[in-house]
Structures are given as structure tokens and as C-alpha cells.
Image: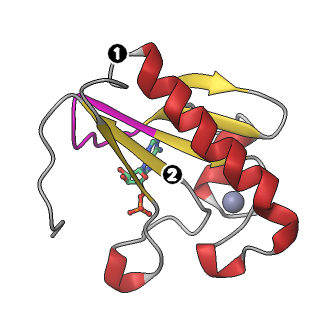
């Protein structure tokens, strides 16, 4: 398996882990775009959002809840934070194993670039 995030899940590549349970891990992004920039990643390999099925609903819900918990633990629940799933080329997806970006600690602009 040549997937970067599968290698992080397997412990073959180090990551700065901030959360882990039986189906998810979360770690700091190597190229942070905000003071908090965490990636919430399912242990199961799913390439893009287009590949989700109804069977994954609970997993994706757990990803959203983990993101909210991580943000709350850092005090960003009140001030606010942003969550992003990039899907495919025009959105800038570079790692084809789904991940939820969790960004906080600065003012975010809208619309995004
Ligand atoms: P995306 O562009 O949505 O596919 O996001 C991929 C993210 O993975 C980018 O924000 C990268 O900075 C991040 N990334 C790439 N390699 C690593 C790594 N080894 N550890 C942590 N984050 C990484
Ligand atoms: Zn993978």
C-alpha cells in the first residue's frame, strides 16, 4: 500500500498524533495553515468523498465529532474554527485517503480561495 496516510495509520511514517481510537487517528498537519491545523483520518482507506457509501455514515459522523472535540480541547469551540474536506483536483486534494482538516486560531476568510 503506497498511501501516505495508511502508512501513518500503520506507524510506518511518524506523525504528531493528537487523538486515536479504534477507527480514527488525528495528527498535526506537517504544513500548518493556522495555529491549529489537525487532520482527522479514518484508519480505513477511502480515497475521496466520492467513495463514501451509507455504510460509512457513522464513521464520517465520528470524524466530525472528533474534530469538534479537538477544537473544544484547544478552546476554539467559542471563537470558532473551520473544517474542510477537499475532494479531487480542483479542490486541491493531494492525499487520496479522506481526511478532515480542522483549522483554528486565526480569523478565516470566506469565500475560500
Ligand atoms: P489535501 O490537500 O486536502 O489532500 O491535504 C493533505 C494535507 O496533508 C496537506 O495539508 C499536507 O500538508 C498534509 N500532509 C502531507 N504529508 C503529511 C505528513 N507526512 N504528515 C502530516 N501531514 C501531512
Ligand atoms: Zn490510505
Q: In terms of secondary structure, what is the magenta stretch mainly?
A: loop
108 lies left or right of 14:
left
Element carrying mark 1: loop
Quarter in which the C terminus is drawn: bottom left
Mark pair 2, 1: CA separation: 19 Å
Q: Residue at the spot x=59%, y=55% of the render?
A: 4
Tell which of 35 and 55 is nearer to you. Answer: 55
Q: Position of residue 8 (x, y in %)?
A: 64, 41
> Residue beneath label 2, please?
100
- Compared to 25, does 112 lie above or below? below
On the image, the x and y values in percent for residue 12 come to 69, 38
Residue 12's tag is none
Secondary-structure class at tag 2? strand
Residue stretch in magenta:
29-38
Query: In the image, what residue occupies the spot 71% across and 42% down?
Result: 62
Q: Position of residue 27 (x, y in %)?
A: 52, 32
What quarter of the picture does the N terminus occupy?
A: bottom right
Q: Which residue is mark 1?
A: 75
| Residue 40: image location, x then y, percent | 56, 42
> Magenta segment: does it hold 34?
yes
Figure quadrant of residue 10? top right
- The reply, left or right, for residue 93 in relation to residue 109 is right
Residue under the point 62% across and 63% down = 97
**Is residue 86 shown above or below 51?**
above
Of label 2 and label 1, which has the lower sequence position? Answer: 1
Q: Is residue 74 above or below residue 55?
A: above
Amino acid at each position: 500500500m503506497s498511501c501516505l496516510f495508511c502508512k501513518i495509520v500503520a506507524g510506518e511514517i511518524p506523525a504528531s498524533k493528537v487523538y486515536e481510537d479504534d477507527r480514527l487517528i488525528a495528527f498535526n498537519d506537517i504544513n500548518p495553515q493556522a495555529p491549529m491545523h489537525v487532520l482527522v483520518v479514518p484508519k480505513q482507506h477511502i480515497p475521496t468523498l466520492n467513495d463514501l457509501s451509507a455504510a460509512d455514515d457513522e464513521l464520517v459522523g465520528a470524524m466530525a465529532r472528533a474534530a469538534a472535540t479537538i477544537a473544544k480541547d484547544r478552546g476554539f469551540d467559542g471563537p470558532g474554527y473551520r473544517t474542510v474536506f477537499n475532494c479531487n483536483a480542483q479542490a486541491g486534494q493531494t492525499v487520496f485517503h479522506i481526511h478532515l482538516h480542522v483549522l483554528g486560531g486565526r480569523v478565516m476568510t470566506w469565500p475560500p480561495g
